[in-house]
Amino acid sequence: MHINFDSETPIYIQIAESIEDGVLSGAFAEETQIPSTTDISLAYRINPATVLKGMNLLTDEGVLYKKRGVGMFVSPGAAKIIEKKRKRGFYERYVASLLEEARKLGIEKEELISMIREEGQDGKRD
């Protein structure tokens, strides 16, 4: 887990994203326990309430679930939930603005697809 205290991204969001990254990478498998709020807060010298806020965000999204008196666990299907959320965010942040700019420049769909394919083949663009 990496926390950037100089980032504009709130710490609780960074915590949630780090846990998501762990789920996607397989570091946190479904039905396994994640580090406790206390462990994370002590390791990174973060207020436990901040850590809990990040975990509660993931609980609300169905990525984590609580076992009373035991801790937080990765939900079944968590990776799919995260992938769906991140794909939606990717579309909203990158694809939608790409399409809007292409419309402004009069770039047709086929030409745009061709540009993407060319870039993907050699990694260079003239």
Image (cartoon, rainbow, N blue to C red):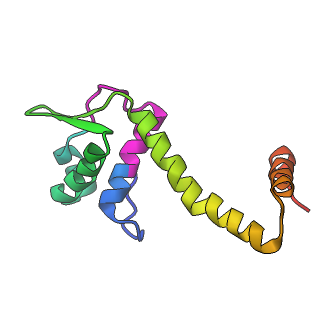
Q: Is residue 18 left or right of residue 120?
A: left
Q: Nearer the viewer, residue 76 or 72?
A: 76
Outermost left residue: 69
The range drawn in magenta is 17-34
Residue drawn 34% across and 27% down?
Answer: 76
Q: Quadrant of residue 96?
A: bottom right
Q: Is residue 63 magenta?
A: no
Rendered location of residue 64, percent (x, y): 28, 38
Outermost bottom residue: 104
Q: Is residue 1 visible?
A: no
Q: Is residue 19 magenta?
A: yes
Q: Quadrant of residue 82?
A: top left
Q: Is residue 14 left or right of residue 98?
A: left
Residue drawn 29% across and 27% down?
Answer: 32
Q: Nearer the viewer, residue 124 or 43?
A: 124
Residue drawn 23% across and 49% down?
Answer: 56
Rendered location of residue 80, percent (x, y): 45, 34
Does 22 sit above or below residue 77?
below
Q: Nearer the viewer, residue 77 or 11?
A: 77
